[in-house]
Amino acid sequence: MKFLDETKIFIKSGDGGSGCVSFRREKNIPFGGPDGGDGGRGGDVVLEGVEQFNTLIDFRYKQHLKAGRGRDGMGKNRSGPKGASITIKLPVGTQVFDEDKETLLVDITEMGQRVVIADGGDGGHGNTHFKSSTNQAPRRADPGYPGSERWLWLRLKLIADAGLVGLPNAGKSTLLGAVSRAHPKIGSYPFTTLHPNLGVVYARGSEFVVADIPGLIEGASEGAGLGTRFLGHVERCRVLVHLVDGTADDVAEAYRVIRHEVDAYGGGLSEKRELVVLTKSDSLSAEAIEEKQSQLAEACGADVGVISAVSGDGLPVLLDRLLATIKAEIAPDEVSEAYAP
């Protein structure tokens, strides 16, 4: 399934049905009076959050979504049936913006969350509604009120417990493939990953979701290399796992480049807990690992993990630390000492 995290759709709620002009005409009832029913209400457009989707690709091929029109009123005081409403199923994490692409209308953050984004038009009154003591045979009926229509922008921000960030070719996809059942594309060249991937990780009887986003470059916070869209996918993550390629010439500078973009992006990213990890230890000697780990620790001011996603070295320790950090973010006072890093 192709991944799409932003698209534009057109929605229209149903028009209301028209009222009916009718008079009761039955044998032995010469003055039956008006009996025109009201028109039915138009259908609504409803947004609903679901878990089985993690892409907006379906809306690329079906951009126009319209609810049903209310039926017209009928004689014998019969109101027209309501038009059929439509429910637009969106992945959890979808933000809905107005046509200006800036005004946030709805943020779908929970499974089953339902929001009426466009109300159907009211049905028009039939002539029964207008009868009075001075107007006993009204021939007036109102047309139905039109529904509302608008263009909307949908923007998906994946919801995960941990987000992997780093420069291109830092080993993010390799790590995701090693600790979960996800099968991201892996290559020895930059920008192998072109869209975010999700994987479920099982550790110590618990499970959590990890998001792998494409590699970031300098200027990502200003949109370079689609950086703003990629960073948006880790906005909702509880923890950031910052991967630094151990084979890089200057690991401290590699860390500072991404950290600057994370801080400059905003959206609360700079306040999130961060685990810094030196990757590709299988390609380094013990002396080089110690030297680069020390340089990286000095740059970030925290302990630095060392892993090799290919050989599996350091992965159990990293997963324990990650699980403990996630639990601390969920319930800081309830973290088990057994999981403390």
Image: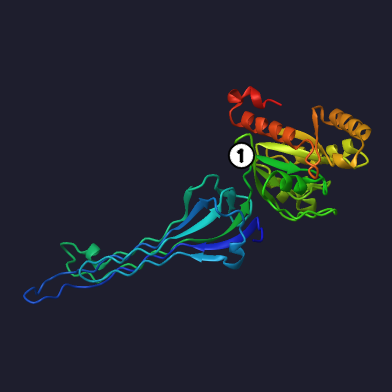
In the image, farthest residue toward the left: 28
**Residue 27 locus on image (x, y percent):** 8, 77
For residue 146, which quarter of the picture?
Answer: bottom left
The image's colour scheme reads rainbow
Element type where label 1 sits in the image: strand
- Residue type of the residue flagged with mark 1: Glu
> 316 above or below 200?
above
In the image, farthest residue toward the front: 311
**Where, quadrant-wise, is the N terminus in this rendering?**
bottom right
Q: Nearer the viewer, residue 72 or 116?
A: 116
Residue at x 23% of width, y 71% of height: 75
Residue at x 65% of width, y 24% of height: 338
Q: Nearer the viewer, residue 6 or 207?
A: 207
Query: How many marks can you see?
Result: 1
For residue 163, which quarter of the picture?
Answer: top right
**Residue 299 locus on image (x, y percent):** 86, 31
Task: Locate residue 55 relative to residue 242 in the image: left or right.
Answer: left
Task: Locate residue 199 relative to residue 150 in the image: left or right.
Answer: right
For residue 70, which quarter of the picture?
Answer: bottom left
> 92 above or below 253?
below
**Residue 29 locus on image (x, y percent):** 8, 73
Residue under pointer 1: 207
Callout 1 crowding tier (Cα within 10 Å): few <14, some 14–19, many ≥20: few
